[in-house]
């Protein structure tokens, strides 16, 4: 069979996680309109009769502004080194800019490279032609594929190209396994997604979520989650008037978690301030970001 590891890399917000979810057909990685949503390497394992492809979603690469940013970039670079093919995803609705140049200056590919022009529903012919010209100059050997991850357009075309470029190999994972992340991580991510979607301005980037192990053997599944924020002043925003905001986040998260587990749950959320956690090595390690 054809098999191997394929990294999904690119700038923040280009649609890497959306693409992963569409390929696997299930929500593996959280998606929001905000940059730097993904903070970890997340595997989505694709299987068909003749292949197993392990896709690795990564944090968007950007010029880091704090220790968390540096950790996120490092994870993306490491993933490229560990993969047979790198899929470099580009937002084809945006003109080439400094953020794109930053990636040209910092990325080196020893593996095969596929450049995926995503969001073709939002682009036009001049824009995409200019982008393709620039990527062709920078990466002359790369294969180009156009997709619209949002509408699942040409996902099959991308899979075909990947299969053609992977070697024969073993089946790395059991067919029932679709990701490398455990239930606890996925629950934390769902809560974080709902917090990102509901909180405005600068609060979202300073949010992390921690929860205890989840015991599925009990009839009643109680999940206790802690939303971590950076500053005392954000507390009132996250809790909201009369607890309205945290209730809203909790209700949205509960729905998605119940869909994922297929059981009813009780979800209790609290908020804790950990000052400047994005620059705290020990906290980043505790939360599993290092
Ligand atoms: N119109 C359109 N929107 C898209 C498409 N693909 C993704 N999006 C949207 O782009 C936004 C970012 O998507 P994500 O999948 O979270 O992007 P990402 O690259 O994983 O972002 P980070 O995790 O922050 O690096 C979301 O609002 C998606 O709905 C597409 O093909 N067309
Ligand atoms: Mg992402």
Image: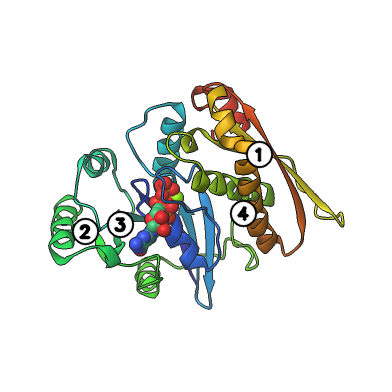
Task: Identify the residue at horizontal 42%, vertical 26% (top origin).
Answer: 66
Mark 4, Cα crowd under 10 Å, few <14 / some 14-19 / many 20+, is: some
First-in-chain label (2 vs 4): 2
> Residue 85 location in percent, x, y?
37, 57
**Ligand 1 is within 8 Å of the C-beta of the residue at disc 3:** no
Could you say which disc has been placed on residue 252 in the image? 4
Instruction: Give the Cα separation between the discs numbered 4 and 1.
Output: 15 Å
Mark 2, Cα crowd under 10 Å, few <14 / some 14-19 / many 20+, is: few
Could you say which disc has been placed on residue 141 in the image? 2
Task: Identify the residue at horizontal 43%, vertical 44% (top origin).
Answer: 59
Q: Nearer the viewer, mark 2 or mark 4?
A: 4
**Ligand 1 is within 8 Å of the C-beta of the residue at disc 4:** no
> Residue 122 location in percent, x, y?
27, 63
User: What residue does disc 3 label?
Assistant: 113
Question: Mark 4–mark 3 contact, CB under 8 Å?
Answer: no
Q: Above or below — where is 21 with respect to 103?
A: below
First-in-chain label (4 vs 3): 3
Instruction: Give the Cα separation between the discs numbered 1 and 2.
Output: 55 Å
């Amino acid at each position: 069979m054809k098999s191997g590891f394929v990294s999904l890399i690119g700038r923040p917000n280009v649609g890497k996680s959306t693409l992963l979810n569409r390929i696997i057909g299930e929500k593996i990685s959280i998606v929001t309109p905000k940059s730097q949503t993904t903070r970890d390497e997340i595997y989505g394992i694709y299987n068909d009769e003749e292949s197993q492809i392990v896709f690795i979603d990564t944090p968007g690469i950007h010029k880091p502004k704090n220790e968390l940013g540096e950790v996120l970039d490092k994870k993306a670079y490491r993933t490229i080194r560990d993969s047979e093919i790198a899929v470099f995803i580009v937002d084809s609705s945006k003109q080439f800019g400094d953020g794109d140049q930053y990636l040209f200056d910092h990325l080196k590919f020893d593996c095969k490279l596929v450049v995926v022009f995503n969001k073709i529903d939002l682009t036009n012919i001049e824009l995409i032609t200019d982008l393709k010209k620039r990527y062709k100059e920078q990466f002359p050997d790369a294969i180009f594929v156009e997709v619209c991850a949002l509408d699942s357009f040409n996902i099959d075309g991308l899979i075909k190209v990947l299969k053609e470029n992977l070697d024969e190999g073993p089946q790395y994972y059991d067919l029932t396994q679709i990701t490398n992340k455990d239930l606890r991580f996925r629950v934390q991510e769902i809560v974080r997604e709902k917090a990102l979607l509901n909180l405005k301005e600068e609060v979202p980037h300073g949010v992390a979520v921690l929860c205890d192990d989840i015991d599925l053997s009990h009839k009643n599944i109680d999940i206790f989650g802690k939303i971590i924020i950076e500053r005392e002043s954000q507390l009132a925003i996250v809790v909201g008037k009369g607890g309205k905001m945290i209730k809203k986040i909790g209700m949205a998260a509960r729905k998605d978690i119940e869909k994922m587990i297929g059981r009813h749950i009780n979800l209790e959320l609290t908020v804790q301030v950990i000052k400047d956690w994005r620059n705290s090595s020990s906290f980043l390690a505790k939360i599993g970001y290092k």
